[in-house]
Amino acid sequence: MDFSDKRVLVTGGTRGIGRAVVEAFVASGASVAINGRTAQSAASTIDALGGGVRLVAAPGNVGTVAGCTAVVKAAIAALGGLDVLVNSAGVARDAPVEDVDEAQWDETLDVNLKGVFFCSREALGALRESGGNIVNVASDAGLMGTPGLVVYCASKGGVVNMTRAMALELAPTVRVNCVCPGYVDTDMIRRDFIDRSDDPAAAEQALTDYAPLKRIASPGEIATAILYLASDDARFVTGAALQIDGGTTAGR
Ligand SMILES: NC(=O)c1ccc[n+]([C@@H]2O[C@H](COP(=O)([O-])OP(=O)(O)OC[C@H]3O[C@@H](n4cnc5c(N)ncnc54)[C@H](O)[C@@H]3O)[C@@H](O)[C@H]2O)c1
């Protein structure tokens, strides 16, 4: 896919799926603003990717409205406009309902749902000008329930349906889509679900067996789908929730 002359902002672009999305857009010719929570994480990602004029930093916490505003404004100023916004920043923590406190609820909803909305709102003027589009990173947990991840499911279900509503409101000028990945091999599942388990090997095997296709996805596989949705090839696609989950949400 050719994204030459396209200007892209990726939230949560310093690690995992977001980082793979940054790499794929850069390889396709785009200029990319990388958001990470800190200036240091964005700068070190740019260094690791070799720097150059097509990579700029847009650090900040997308869990607050002020943070979203600052991140998007910095990206638009540095890139001279915006063609694609990828909302990939997210957090996940498993806990039984009884153990969920207000702080966990707020952090999860603030980053995963509020951040997506307010980054999109801030980017809207520039996206209307360019006829651009938004791709949100939701989850299979936005399409079905997962025990132990009730708060995460609430946030991602919100992302899926917000994507649909926003797609209708912004059509025909700006397209809005989301991807719904199953388990993907990133820090999120290694740190939070595998390494913290009493038996990491068994935990990894359980995540591998979860999808009918019996493996964990690579971040690059999710990036490929995101670039498709962001590209002109998907010019008749809006309001879609594209599952990349090895068949998990196809049914049991
Ligand atoms: N890994 C999976 O199995 C999986 C599955 C489905 C959906 N997802 C979703 O994919 C997205 C990316 O997750 P990942 O697996 O790459 O996780 P990750 O932990 O590897 O990366 C998350 C990224 O989000 C950033 N981030 C977190 N909070 C932030 C904040 N307040 N402000 C700015 N940046 C912030 C982190 O700095 C990091 O760059 C998330 O939305 C996640 O919910 C992941």
Image (cartoon, rainbow, N blue to C red):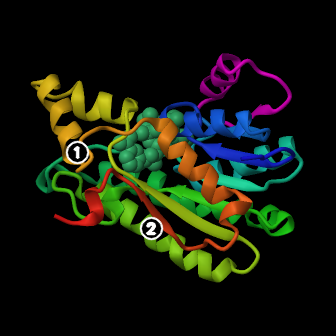
Image location of residue 93, percent across then percent down: 28, 43
The percent position of residue 238, horizontal first and vertical second, equals 60, 73
Is 134 located above or below residue 172 in the figure? above
Q: Name the residue under label 1.
A: 94
Q: Which of 226 and 71 is in front in this view?
A: 226
The one of 41 and 26 positioned closer to us in this rendering: 26
Quadrant of residue 177 in the image? bottom right
- Which of marks 2 and 1 precedes in the sequence? 1
Q: Do the residues labelled 1 and 2 touch (CB within 8 Å)?
A: no
The residue shown at (57%, 42%) is 61
Mark 2 Cα-neighbour bin, 10 Å: few <14, some 14–19, many ≥20: many
What residue appears at the point 68 percent right and 23 percent down from the top-left corner?
43
Amino acid beneath label 1: Asp
Q: Mark 2 points at which residue?
A: 160
Asked if residue 189 lies left or right of residue 124, the reply is left
- Mark 1 falls on what kind of element? loop
Q: Nearer the viewer, mark 1 or mark 2?
A: 2
Q: Horizontal placement of 40 versus 90: left or right?
A: right
